[in-house]
Amino acid sequence: MIQLKNISKSFSSKKNEEVIALKDVSLEVKKGEIFGVIGYSGAGKSTLVRCVNLLEKPTSGEVFVNGENLSAMSSAKLRETRQKIGMIFQGFNLLKTATVFDNIAIPLKLTGVPKADISKRVTKYLDIVGLSEKHHVYPSQLSGGQKQRVAIARALSHEPEVLLSDEATSALDPETTHSILDLLLKINKEFGITILLITHEMHVIQKICDRVAVMENGEVVEQGAVIDLYSNPQHGTTKKFVNSLFPNDIPNEILEDLQKQGPIIDLTFIGTSTDKPALSMVSKKFNVHTNILSGNIIQLKDKPFGKLTAHIQGDKSETDKALAYLQNEGVQVNEVSKK
Ligand SMILES: Nc1ncnc2c1ncn2[C@@H]1O[C@H](COP(=O)(O)OP(=O)(O)OP(=O)(O)O)[C@@H](O)[C@H]1O
Ligand SMILES: [Mg+2]
C-alpha cells in the first residue's frame, strides 16, 4: 500500500550545514496493516512520515501509494491523491475559532464535497469517534482525547485509504492513549484503512501494530513483525527499547556470585507458552532449584509475550537437562552474561 524506495532527505541548516534527516530508507506497508515506526527524538520519524504524502519532498528516492508513484505526479494529481492519505498529529491542528462541526466541514467544503453530503459525513464520522454530542462546541471546550477524536473524524471524513499518525497519542495520559489506540484499531478493522504510525513509545507498538521499523540517525536499523523484534531483537537500539519493558539490571558482582551455583537465564514466552508452569516443572523433573529474579508479561496485539530472568541452581549435568527441557517446551532460553 505504501512503498518507500531508497528515500533520503537532507535539509540545510541556518549555518548552511547539511542535516541528513533520512538515509536511504526503504520500507513497505501492506494493505490493511498497522505499521509502526519507533525511534528516539531526532531519528527522522516525522520527516519519514511527511515524505509519504510529499509534505516533505525527498532529496532522492521514490514514494508509491497504492501502486502510484507520487514523486512523478503533477501537482493536480498529487492534490487528488493526498485526499486518500489522512494524517493526525500530536498537536491535533484544529481551528480554534471553528466549532467541532466546522472543523470537519470546512476542509470537506474546500475539497469540493457537495453541501448535502457534508453534513451527512460530519455526523457519520463524529458518531464513529464517539463525539455526536459535541457538534457545536469549540475545541477549547474539549479534552485532549476529545480533540484527537475530532482530528481523527476530520481525517476519516475524506474517506482515506491510508492514515498517517505522527505521535498522535504522545500528549495524552495513559488511559486516553489507550482509548485513542482502540479507536485506531477499530478504524483499521472496520474500514480496512492502512495505518502508518510514528511513536517513541513501545506500548503503542505492542498494542496495535502488526509490524515495526526501528529508526536511528535517519536510518531504519531493523524491521519486522512485532513479535519477532520483541522476542529476538538484533540491533542495539531495538534491544534498548525491548529491555525498557523488561528491566533486569543484575549487578555484575551478584551475577558472578550466582553463576557459581548455576546459570542465570532469560526465558522468553510467546503465546500459549506464557501460561505453562515451565519453571516449576523443571524443579520437579530435575535435581535443580529455580529462583525468579525478575519478570514481566505483556499483551501484544494478538498474543501474550513474557520474559523472565531466573537462576537455575544445581549440578551442571542437571541444569543442562533443565535448559534442554525448557527449550523443548517452546520457551526461548538465553544465558545471561556479564555486561
Ligand atoms: N525543516 C527542517 N530543517 C532543518 N532540519 C530539519 C528540519 N526538519 C527536521 N530536521 C532535522 O532532521 C532530523 C530528524 O528530524 P525529525 O523531526 O524527523 O525527527 P523525529 O524522529 O520526528 O524526532 P521527534 O521524536 O523529536 O519528533 C533532526 O536532526 C532535525 O533537526
Ligand atoms: Mg517527530
Image (cartoon, rainbow, N blue to C red):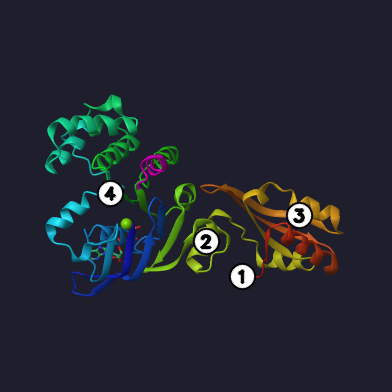
Residue 87's label in the rendered image is: 4
**Mark 3 or mark 2, earlier in chain:** 2
Residue 229's label in the rendered image is: 2
Cα distance in 3D space between marks 1 and 4: 42 Å
Question: Secondary structure under badge 3?
Answer: strand
Going by the numbered disc 2, the residue's amino acid type is Leu
Q: What percent of the width, then of the height, locates residue 302?
A: 54, 47
Q: Quadrant of ligand 2?
A: bottom left
Q: Residues within 10 Å of mark 3 (few under 14, many from 20)?
A: some
Cα distance in 3D space between marks 1 and 3: 21 Å
- 190 falls in the magenta region: yes
Q: What percent of the width, then of the height, locates residue 339?
A: 61, 70
Q: Residue at the far bottom: name it.
A: 17
Cα distance in 3D space between marks 4 and 2: 26 Å
Q: Is residue 233 visible?
A: yes
Q: Are marks 1 and 4 in contact (CB under 8 Å)?
A: no
Point out the stretch of residues depicted in magenta.
184-193
Q: Mark 3 points at which residue?
A: 291
Q: Which of 53 and 76 is in front in this view?
A: 76
